[in-house]
Amino acid sequence: MIFLQLFWVYIKIGLFSFGGGYAMLSLIQNEVVDKYKWISLQEFTDVVAISQMTPGPIGINSATYIGYTAIHNAGYSTGLAIGGSCIATFAVCLPSFILVLIISYYFSRFKQNRYVESAFTGLRPASVGLIAAAALLLMNHENFIDYKSFLIFGAAFILTWKFKLHPVLMIFLAGIAGLVLYW
Amino acid sequence: MYWTLFLIFVRIGTFTIGGGYAMLPLIEREVVNRGLITKEDFIDLFAVAQSLPGIFAVNISIFLGYKLKGIKGSTVCALGAILPSFVIILAIALFFSQIQNNVWVEKIFKGLRPAVVALIVVPCMTAARSAGLTWKTAGVAITAALLIWLVRISPVYIIVTAAMGGLLCKLNIKKW
């Protein structure tokens, strides 16, 4: 049953995520943490951190990781958990596959389609809201445990926003800051 | 040919840290400079891949593969793009559950978590800027964020409503 749910959830994530990986986060969080409770919000934050440090799109990374963890936490064997990560990763790509094949057929017509364009006047601001929601959802007591957390948050924000520090470097620095501050 | 395509996308999948758009220059170098498609075709592909739901890098790999070698080609390219992150994350997932409760790992993650939030706030502001938000569209963004955050509405409904709203708005304005 959980395998079917996993498949269905990631089909939905693949089908309804517009505006890139970050906009996808609130959708993943809504399904995986709120609705099905496969992982905790803290674990979810850790997955995002790991995705930032490893190559590849966040959508694939989270599908692989959560597919594994959801099955593993449900008490199944490691082999089945690997199966879970295959299912989630496959499912998140499946809608793209079908859509691309359909659209390749009508390629030139889709490109300047005014309906598509109009839909995007609504989708663009909404996806900004989706990213903002992902940030707001993660600003909670599990992730911000004391004043040091706010210090790290402030420093990370200024370094990436003002000084354009690379996210990977930022993650490494934050890890070191955690080791030092919580010694 | 299939093998070459596969390897190109494995390379793209392996060397891009930080997601979708960071991949773009690399994809362009690999496929345009090798003469697989023209620069104009690439820009068109990019525009369409961007307006489809799902993972941008996967969309572009499927498009390119299909254009060059049909359905088989798109399967090969997509597999190549997915495989590196799949293998790496699976290895981490297998390993992480064992070290998760280690004192040192916990300290590191206490530092990482607030930084992750900052790393989401920044692209949010960049996206707000590049979407060219006006007062009206900023209202859409804020409403969407609040509904998801406080009311815990599924983003699926937000997406569907926003797309329909955009359609209705634009088509009505054109009628006037």
Image: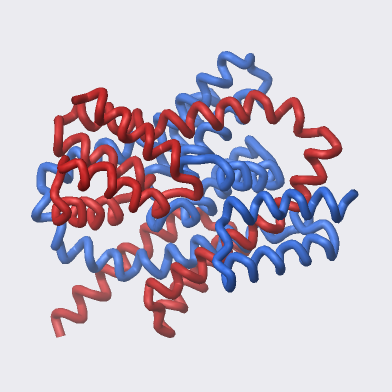
- Percent across and percent down for residue A153 are 71, 64
Within the image, what quadrant is residue B75 found in? top left
**Quadrant for the C terminus of chain B in the image:** bottom left
**B176 in relation to B127, above or below:** below
Residue found at x 65% / y 48%: A45
Q: Is residue A131 above or below residue A34?
A: below
Q: Is residue A180 left or right of residue B172?
A: right
Q: How is the image coloured?
A: by chain
- Residue lying farthest to the right in this orientation: A183
Q: Residue furthest front?
A: B33
* The one of A86 and B149 positioned closer to us in this rendering: A86
Q: Residue at x 66, y 38 (%)?
A: A39
Label total for image: 0
Return the residue nearer the eye: A141 or A6.
A141
Whether residue B23 is visible to the viewer of this picture, yes or no, is yes
Name the one closer to the observer, B27 or B139.
Answer: B27
Q: Which chain is red in the picture? A: B
Determine whether, in the image, residue A10 is placed left or right of residue A15.
right
- The image shows residue A172 at horizontal and vertical percentages of 67, 49
Query: Is residue A77 left or right of B38 when viewed as pictured?
Result: right
Q: Nearer the viewer, residue B100 or A131?
A: B100
The percent coordinates of residue B7 (x first, y second) are: 32, 29
Whether residue A142 can be seen here: no
Task: Name which residue lies at 51% across and 73% down.
Answer: B142
Q: Residue at x 71, y 58 (%)?
A: B114
Q: Position of residue A81 (x, y in %)?
A: 58, 21
Query: Chain letter for blue?
Result: A
Q: Quadrant of the N terminus of chain B?
A: top left
